Image: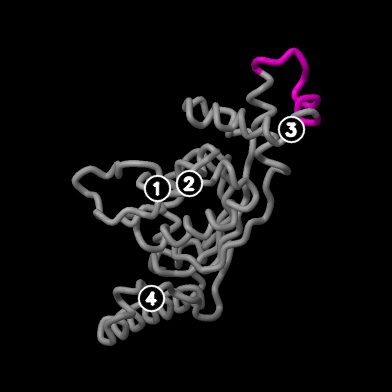
Amino acid sequence: MDVKLLFHTPEPERAIAAAARLCYAPVGAAELLEDMSEDAVRRVLRTIITSGHTSALEHAVYSFAVDGVSRAMTHQLVRHRLASYNQQSQRYVTYAEEPCFITPPSVAAHPEAAAAFAEATKAAFASYRALVDAGVPAEDARYLLPNAMETKIVITMNVRELLHFFELRCCKRAQWEIRELALAMLDLGEPTAPYIFADAGASCRRGPCREGKMTCGDPYPRAPKRE
């Protein structure tokens, strides 16, 4: 898996704080953005985050490029509807050579299972190529391609949705591949907005686990406390 942060809103914490302050200020957001000190930015962020009035977090956005993930994972990913996605199309991309297939660790750990997995994906791709070579459109031949096939996707989320995504998908109960993606995205985003992302991640970083009876019972270490 290769995850890169393509773009993000410049000075995301200041942008969010200025948008939040606008509701109560007699001047415009541009003036607020210039005049707010770092301490003022932190005070505003603390207020909106602790109060749960987090709509202002939607004014900062992040775009990530993700390669080397399975289509099984991206089917989970796009359930996060408050985001934008562009994914490599199996309709318009015709594969001449056998692509990569993502092998789950539980499969790779067992030689017999790994061999059966590799044989099945190889057979599926061979059948796909046979259909394409026979003149079947790629958009129809792709019906044979398995969920394990490697794909590429661009993800854009605002900060509010990112925090929600991290809470659900950084949890140890999340499926292994989407959890790996979420942790990589958090690692890339945190340096750009360290106050906002200080305790981002599974709910147990901030307090009791929200998984109820499904809890893993093994919480993360507490996140650094915001000051």
Proximity of marks 2 and 3: CB atoms separated by less than 8 Å: no
Mark 2: which amino acid?
Answer: Ala
Proximity of marks 2 and 1: CB atoms separated by less than 8 Å: yes
Please give the residue where the numbered disc 1 appears in the rendered image.
205
Q: Earlier in the sequence, mark 4 or mark 1?
A: 4
Please give the residue where the numbered disc 3 appears in the rendered image.
37
**Rendered image quadrant of residue 125:** bottom left
Mark 3 residue element: loop
Note whether 34 is above or below 21 in the view shown.
below
Q: Position of residue 38 (x, y in %)?
A: 70, 36
Instruction: Give me the C-alpha separation between circle 2 and circle 1.
Output: 8 Å
Q: Earlier in the sequence, mark 2 or mark 4?
A: 4
Q: Residue furthest top?
A: 26
Mark 1: which amino acid?
Answer: Arg
In the image, which is nearer the foreground, mark 2 or mark 4?
2
Q: Quick one: label 4, few (<14), some, or many (20+) residues within 10 Å?
A: some
Mark 1 residue element: helix
Proximity of marks 4 and 1: CB atoms separated by less than 8 Å: no
**Rendered image quadrant of residue 178:** bottom left
Mark 2 residue element: loop
Instruction: Give me the C-alpha separation between circle 2 and circle 3.
Output: 24 Å
